[in-house]
Structures are given as C-alpha cells and as structure tokens.
C-alpha cells in the first residue's frame, strides 16, 4: 500500500536507524526503496545487511552523483505502491505513522486518490533527542477546518483544506505547506506531475508540492507528530543554510517566471502577484530576519539582488524601504530589527492561539 522512498548520500551513521524505524511500523503493507547517490561511505553495505533480513527493501545505486533533486526523482521512480512517502535517510518514522495514514485514506474512500496528507513532526538532534516540534503552519493553512470524524478516528486534530486555496496561500508566501518527511500522496498524483521535474535545485520539494496541489482535490494535516526530523550539521537544511541565502534567492526568483500558468490560474494569482510575494517574503521578511541575526552584509546583497530582479516592486514595497533604513543605521538597526521580529512573532502567536481556541469550540 505504501512506498517509502529513501534517497541517500553518505548517511551510513543514520541510515540503519532510519530503516529500523520503517521496519517497526505497526501497519505492515509497505515497500522500502533506497536510492543511493554514489555514496563513498558504508551506506550500501548497511542497506544490503537489512535486505538480507527483509525482502521488502530494494536498493538502487547511482553510477555517479546526480544531485539532490536528481536522486529524489530516482528514488520516486522505484515506487510501485498506491501511496508514496519521501523519507530522508537521517529521519525517522514513529511506529504508528503508516497506521494513521492508512486509516485516514481508508476513511476518505474514492477521494483518497486526489488527497495529500502531512503531519506534525518532532525535531531531534544528531543523537535522536527531542529538541522541539513542527506543527501546522497557520500562515499556510489559514482557512483550514478541523475534520471532526477524522480527528476522532486518529485521536488528534486533523485539518482539511481545499488544495486550490492552500496553493494560493503557499504561492502568496513563497513557502511550502507540508513537511518533507511526513508528506504522503497517491502515486497517481506523483505521476501526473511528472515527479520532481518542475525545477528548483535548492528546494525541489517546494516546486513538487506546488505541482501536487495543482492536481489534488483536498489536503489534510494531522497535527500530531508521526515522524522525527533530525537536525544536525550535515543534513540538507544545514547544508542549504551554510551555502548562503543568495542561492536560495536564485531558486525563488526563477520560480517567479517559471511556475506554470495553470498553477497560477488555479491559485487565482497573477505573475506579478507572485513576483510581489518574492519581494515581500524572500527579500523583505527574510532580510529583516537576517538583519536581526546581525548579517548586515548579507542583507545588503539581498537588497541588491532584489533591485536587479524587480526594481519597481522593490521601490513600491514599504517593508523594503524600512529595511534599507535599518541596514543604514548599523548596529542600532540590527537591535531594532530584532525587537521588531520578536513583537511580530508574539503578535502572530497570540492571534493563532485565539483562532485555534475559537475553532475548537
């Protein structure tokens, strides 16, 4: 019923633990598909050791490293089950994860064929110790409704939203509404969008998620951690952060003119609206965040990048004008940005708490 696709590169240290978490699932109808991206450590030997124990594990080895996005596509191409999950080779599944998703899809009946499901995750460190959680992102899921029957079935809050509206929210903020490791989707939807062919070398999963929303009917979020997301110095998120924000901006800028017209039409968003979202969220808001962290040089580069991409939109954006003043103010601007970010975060948390309390009545 489920294809657990695991792209891997040099994660010998974590790969065995990841496989153990999959094999410990209470729901047993699944296959485990590992695509090794020409690892130079003992990753392949680890997988072969588990293959000897469980015939559900399959392994393909790339002749050369095809990059992160390329290996995602290689792993996905191995899938043959009805539903797919892309699990990083350092992340973990809770034992009841597949059982929860199986119950949800069974409850949906025929609608399951066009539904996407994701869940909250527990953040763990390199030793597997919990350090936090990733819950539903209400900036993305604004307007979602709690499904009473599914919530009772899974003994956790389950929210549902029309995929077209969720796509609009996501494009309008240049973000992705799902957590990579916990997202499950029908193979039919994956095939309909041609896997990871939408572009995005830095965050290919974002473009893939947008494409899925372009084809899906509904999206569901189980607001209980069913997966564990490992954060350490060598995982994909850390490598992306260390490689510099400008590479991320290049990916985001390319998206403003390469996202398909059909996706924009479904979301009810114009091309100019997408470009404005890029300036607002990727330049202005990320700029304030970086300034609050003391990265003034990076913020200057971000502003210069935005000026080169969309000078008129940059001039018209109020937050950009304030950001320029804050950068010019030196250390005082950094302190101001930090205090402003803290106030905005507290106000948002208060608003979301009030909306959640109202929705639970």
Image: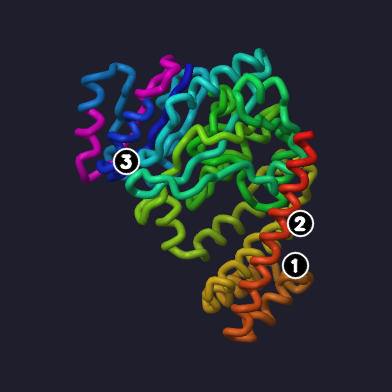
Going from the N terminus, do you reach mark 3 or mark 1 first? 3
Figure quadrant of residue 120: top right
Which part of the image, by quadrant, shows the C terminus? top right
| SS type, badge 3 | loop
Q: Which residue is disc 3 drawn over?
A: 37
Write the residue at 46% across / 60% down.
Answer: 241
Q: How far apart are the alpha carbons under marks 3 and 1? A: 41 Å
Q: Which mark is residue 103?
A: none
Q: Secondary structure at mark 1?
A: helix
Q: Work out whether residue 360 or residue 116 is closer to the camera in this orientation and state it.
A: 360
Nearest to viewer (mark 3 / mark 2): 3
Q: Which residue is mark 2?
A: 272
Q: Residue at x 77, y 47 (%)?
A: 354
Nearer to the camera, 307 or 140: 140
Q: Which residues are magenta?
A: 23-48
Disc 2 + disc 1, Cβ < 8 Å? yes
Q: Is residue 245 magenta?
A: no
Q: Earlier in the sequence, mark 3 or mark 2?
A: 3
* On screen, residue 361 above or below 53: below
Residue found 65% across the figure and 67% down from its top: 341
Q: Position of residue 311 (x, y in %)?
A: 71, 71
Q: Position of residue 116 (x, y in %)?
A: 61, 29
Q: Are marks 3 and 2 in contact (CB under 8 Å)?
A: no
Q: Earlier in the sequence, mark 2 or mark 1?
A: 2
- Which residue is at 40% across, 36% downward? 92
The percent coordinates of residue 302 (x first, y second) are 58, 71
The circle on residue 313 is 1
Q: How many other residues sit within 10 Å of disc 2, few (<14), some (14-19) or many (≥20)? A: few
């Amino acid at each position: 019923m489920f294809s657990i696709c695991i792209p891997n590169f040099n994660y010998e240290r974590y790969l065995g633990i990841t496989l153990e978490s999959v094999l410990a699932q209470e729901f047993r109808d699944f296959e485990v598909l590992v695509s090794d991206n020409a690892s130079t450590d003992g990753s392949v030997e680890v997988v072969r050791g588990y293959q000897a124990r469980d015939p559900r594990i399959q392994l393909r080895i790339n002749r050369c490293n095809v990059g992160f996005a390329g290996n995602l596509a290689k792993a996905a191409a191995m899938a043959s089950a009805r539903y797919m999950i892309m699990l990083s080779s350092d992340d973990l599944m809770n034992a009841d994860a597949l059982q929860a998703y199986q119950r949800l899809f069974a409850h949906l009946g025929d609608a399951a064929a066009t539904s996407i499901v994701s869940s909250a995750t527990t953040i763990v460190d390199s030793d597997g110790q919990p350090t936090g959680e990733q819950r539903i992102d209400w900036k993305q899921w604004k307007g979602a409704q709690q499904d009473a029957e599914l919530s009772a079935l899974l003994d956790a809050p389950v929210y549902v939203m029309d995929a077209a509206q969720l796509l609009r929210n996501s494009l309008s903020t240049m973000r992705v509404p799902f957590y990579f490791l916990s997202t499950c989707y029908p193979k039919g939807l994956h095939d309909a969008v041609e896997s990871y062919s939408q572009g995005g070398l830095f965050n290919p999963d974002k473009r893939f998620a947008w494409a899925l929303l372009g084809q899906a009917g509904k999206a569901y979020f189980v607001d209980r951690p069913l997966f564990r997301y490992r954060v350490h110095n060598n995982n994909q998120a850390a490598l992306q952060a260390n490689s510099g924000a400008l590479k991320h901006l290049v990916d985001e800028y390319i998206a403003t003119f390469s996202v398909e017209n059909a996706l924009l039409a479904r979301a009810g968003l114009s091309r100019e609206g997408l470009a404005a979202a890029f300036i607002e969220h990727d330049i202005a808001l990320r700029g304030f965040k970086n300034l609050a962290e003391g990265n003034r040089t990076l913020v200057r580069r971000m502003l210069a990048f935005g000026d080169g991409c969309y000078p008129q939109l940059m001039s018209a954006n109020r937050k950009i004008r304030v950001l320029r003043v804050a950068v010019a103010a030196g250390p005082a601007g950094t302190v101001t940005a930090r205090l402003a970010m803290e106030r905005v975060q507290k106000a948002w948390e208060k608003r979301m708490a009030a909306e959640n309390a109202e929705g639970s009545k």
